[in-house]
Image: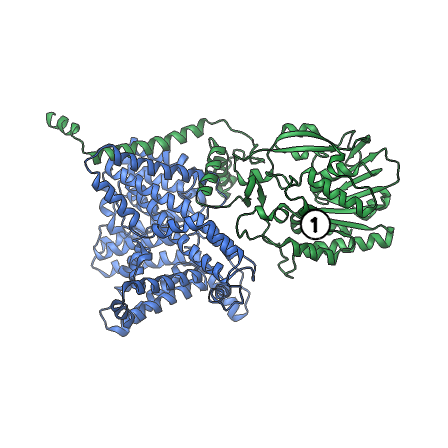
Chain colours: A green, B blue
Amino acid sequence: MKHQMKRRRKLEPRQIRNRVLTIVFVVLLMGLALLNLLWPKQSFSQNENRVLETFPEFSWETLISGKFTEGFDTYITDHFAFRDVWVGAKTFAEIGILKKDSGGVYLAKDGYLIERFDTLERDKQTGQTRYEQNLNYVKTFAENMKARFNIDVRTMLVPTASYVLSEKLPAFAPELDQNELIEQAKTTVPNFLDLRGVLRAHKEEDIYYRTDHHWTNLGVCYAYGAFCQAVGLQAHPPSWYQTETLSEKFYGTTYSKASLYTAQPDTITAYHAPQQPEVSVDYNLGRRVTNTLYERSHLETKDKYSVFLDGNQPIVKITTQNKNGRKLMIIKDSYANSFATFAVNDYEEVTLVDLRHYRAQLSKLVEESGVNEILVLYNVSGFASDANLFLITR
Amino acid sequence: MVFSSLNFMFVFLPIVLGVYFLSPRIIKNLILFLASLVFYAWGEPVYVLLMIFSTLVDYTHGYFVQKYRGTRKAKVFLISSVVINLGVLGFFKYSDFIIGNINALTGASIPLLGLALPIGISFYTFQTMSYTIDVYRGDAKAQRNIISFGAYVSLFPQLVAGPIVRYSTIAEQLNHRRENSELFADGVQRFVTGLGKKVLLANSIGAVWTELSSLPSGELSVLGAWIGAIAYTFQIYFDFSGYSDMAIGLGKMFGFRFLENFQYPYISKSVTEFWRRWHISLGTWFREYLYIPLGGNRKGLPRQIVNIAIVWLCTGIWHGASWNFIVWGVYYGILLMLEKIFLLRVLQKLPSIFGRIYTLFFVIISWVIFAFDSLGQGWTYLKGMFGFGGLALVNDRALYLLLTNAILLAILIIGCTPLPAKVGRTLMRVWNDRKVAPMLVQNVVLAGIFLISVAYLVDSTYNPFLYFRF
């Protein structure tokens, strides 16, 4: 007994070290395990802008097929306590070892988070790029519209921030040459509107969001000016408009992808004409009619860009009091949602068609709606990966 | 289940550790056996039956081999065990490969079986074979207790990616091990080190390889091809040895001492040395149970060359049911023969830097062969590395990856050498009598690695399991 007590008192530093290490490990392991057991479960991640996995259904079938265990693994990862802190810490660790991109997003200069655009999807059989295929669909569409309705289809492929703000990218960032892509578009598609010059001329201004892949309304304003010149409307400088700050707390898509949670939020600004026309906005063929271009309820959520015409809807028809007979249809991606808030100032009707969601026959729609101008408006990167453009020829 | 998952670390492991240490000694092996079955069933719900079948078959064979020791019957049971084990392995792993080749050769169209490969099957069938062979040779006694035997076969620490624990090295520990805080602390250190190697280093550099190897043709550059090959060389080492570290560490927590599996392979001065330092448990297995029984080097050089050829053909096939693995095995077989015949003597006369560069060069090339299932793709990539692919010498992507991974690459290079371990040991020796400093450093470093690894796992967009083909 006495001997044992003596030995206990004289633990060597090494032995103490071993015990402390064991305790630290067990406390970390059990502590985090317990914390996770008690952690409140959320169904949606605001920061990542996605629905989180629910607890998998347990049954003999799901167990045998492995669906239960697979779902369980994802469930644990998705609901890990302080998930955002861990994910954010990882980004910092990567920045610490000189990484310049995270989650497919460049951590560019001046706080810009710019989506990578470095490969083109290709058709496995023909080797043709999807970009080229899509250009050909648009070309066919333009020829059809000209022949059937004598409508000139204009096309606007907006270069993304990684081209316009290329000086802000990290050194040697392996981006695709958007110059080449736009040259290709110019030679394939009739009435192509080249925005490179006008956007590059204003690259020092805030024409793209820092935390989102879209252009800001200032960028749209310049581009709309170029569009007006092309279609014989009067172009206005930004100063002509009255601006309204819609939100100063916009954390967009590239913020979610990069998980750089210290990034500064963006400001969303609306541009109103001095005499704002009254509008009637018809969503999805009469499902819902409003009298505003701005769905302000989205400003309370993560997805604030959806404030413009309620995000991506299959078909939106805006009717204004400009009784000038000009009726514009825009075949588009989300870059056009903010563009439309400018077009309403000059058109009697603006119809937005999103081919990712609109499945009815397009040529029939053109015929029935009596439009007399058509614009195809996508950003270059989205256009290069969009798998629904074949619908444009229907 | 894999070790580098949140589910393993924060659900499975805490429960198993808790139950194991609270249970009386007599049921500890039962706890391990059941835990291992759950661990295995997690990824392979149905194939757990196959593992139980393997356990029962080898338990009974071991029993009879011992019972009839010294008679012809023992040999019959030994052969039966080897045939069943190789049969199971062959059926699940190589059926489709063989059918595919028959179809290609004869123009037949036998339908493929499309069986999913049971995870870890190459590891546990080799372990169970080692059991009956060890018993046959008298290197170990047959295990009486089927629970203890089941625990050996299914032991979750080394179940899915080794090391391949030969029965004779662990027989004693199965029933007479003693867990203690020193072994446990050692185990923690090994586990956390391995976790960091896998999650922080292997996964990070693996993303570089994935990006470069999946580029459309023409977008790769010569520099990029080399960065990719080197990235994969690092990935496979840190992934595999990290996994072995975690296995050995977990084993220690439960009182087992497994043999080492990696010993700084990339500092080797010859390919022969490389294979004494790489996946040691596999090399030992083939030496003990194939090379030496074939006669090894005791029957003259010509016979030795034949033996090397057989062993390396088998080693190649063991790594996967695809032609590139066979080419990879043959490639090493040839290199090792050349070294046996004259190269080793030449290398010994040169400064050691030549040996190291020569070894690394051939090892990097070997991983390119290893990485591509399709020989054609591998060949194209290799040609690209040597400027025969019409590729640009450098491009933006290569420079970008080099710059943004410079620190990671430096860490990887240092991590391949014994330097970090040496620094750690020296510090602990210098501080031997001090109480606080070494404790602080050790805990802060390990807790840091552990916590950052957790962060990487929480945001796990890329966490591949490389051994699904083994």
Tell me the residue at 86%/35% (across/down).
Answer: A322
Residue A245 position (above or below residue A93): above
Work out which residue is located at the far left of the displayed protein and give it.
A2
Residue B259 position (above or below residue B362): above
Within-10-Å neighbours for mark 1: few <14, some 14–19, many 20+? few
Q: Amino acid at mark 1?
A: Gly
Question: Splitting the image into 4 quarters, where does residue A258 fall?
Answer: top right
Residue B345 at x, y percent in the picture: 25, 70
Question: Splitting the image into 4 quarters, where does residue A349 fall?
Answer: top right
**Element on which disc 1 rests:** helix
Residue identified by numbered label 1:
A197
Work out which residue is located at the far bottom of the displayed protein and give it.
B302
Left or right of A6 on screen, residue A237: right
Quadrant of the snapshot with the N terminus of chain A: top left
Q: Nearer the viewer, residue A351 or B28?
A: A351
**Label 1 marks which chain's residue?**
A
Q: Nearer the viewer, residue B294 or A146?
A: A146
Tell me the residue at 56%/40% (across/down).
Answer: A110
Residue B277 at x, y percent in the picture: 30, 56
Q: Is residue A362 visible?
A: yes
Tell me the residue at 34%/52% (across/down).
Answer: B416
Question: Splitting the image into 4 quarters, where does residue A284 fall?
Answer: top right
Residue A186 position (above or below residue B327): above
Q: Nearer the viewer, residue B452 or B60?
A: B452
Residue A298 at x, y percent in the picture: 66, 30
Left or right of A100 on screen, residue A226: right
Residue A376 position (above or below residue B394): above
Q: Is residue B113 visible?
A: no
Number of numbered callouts drawn: 1
